[in-house]
Image: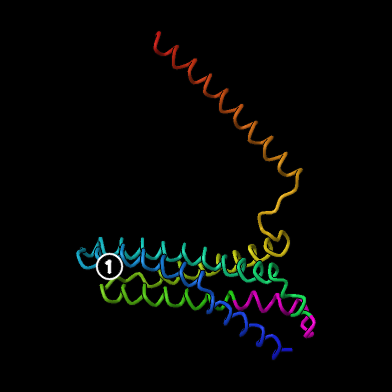
Amino acid sequence: MLGLLWANITAHLIYFRRSRLLLAFGLVFLGIIVLFALPQLFMATKLTVFDVIRIALDEMEIFLVIFSAALGLFLVSSHLRARNLKMVFTKPCPPGLWLVSAFLAAILVSLFIQLLITAVAMTACLAFRLHVQMGVLFVSLDSFAMCVGMIGYLTFLATAMHPVLRVSHGQWAHAFGAFGYDLALAALCFCLSLLFLQRKRLT
């Protein structure tokens, strides 16, 4: 069973590595962070260096949460769209085992990137003699926990609602009804605001 689990995890990791879409997304975001952070690091005082590191760390953690959620969504939805799971489950490979392997593969990639981000942030703090390493560890742990949650949530959406944005006719009616209600409320608030504005002008 463990051998089958590891075989599935390995297959998922190879799938991630060969995905040009995920690679392009990661490289673009990394390039944005580097272009933002590097010029300011070389022209900064100690106070502004701390701000640059903090902002860059926040942006990288946000990227990691989005990227981790995309891993689970992309893996499950692509297999469902290509109808590969029927072949996978006849190996035999139980659905639960395949799903666990998908979770673990996405979590491993997320953990690897999280360790890289933490190492870079720690190195920058040590290089500029900023004693905020415990804060970096706290932010990293909090971000990784959020990544795990987002992987689970988006994987569930991809499984239960494939394609993820599929909606029924009843849901469309509810959405249009809510939109009409919001428009009516906005119109009422506009009329009341105009009424009070005219009163204030006359007083």
Relative to residue 185, is residue 56 depicted above or below?
Answer: below
Q: Position of residue 148 (x, y in %)?
A: 59, 69
One can see residue 135 in this view: no
Q: Nearer the viewer, residue 142 or 172?
A: 172
Residue interval drawn in magenta: 90-105
Name the residue at 66% across, 58% down. 164
Name the residue at 61% across, 32% down. 182
In the image, taking residue 68 as reference, residue 45 lies left or right, namely left
Residue assigned mark 1 = 38
Single out the residue that lies furthest toward the front. 82
Q: Amino acid at mark 1?
A: Leu
Quarter-of-image position of residue 87: bottom right
Q: Nearer the viewer, residue 153 or 94?
A: 94
Q: Nearer the viewer, residue 37 or 28?
A: 28
Name the residue at 69% across, 35% down. 177
Name the image colouring.
Answer: rainbow
User: Pointer 1: residues within 10 angstroms few (<14), some, or many (20+)?
Assistant: few
Q: Position of residue 160 (x, y in %)?
A: 73, 61
- The C terminus lies in quadrant: top left
One can see residue 73 in this view: yes
The overriding secondary structure of the stretch rendered in magenta is helix
Q: Position of residue 22 (x, y in %)?
A: 51, 70
Q: Position of residue 83 (x, y in %)?
A: 73, 71
Q: Secondary structure at mark 1?
A: helix
Name the residue at 39% across, 12% down. 201
- The N terminus lies in quadrant: bottom right
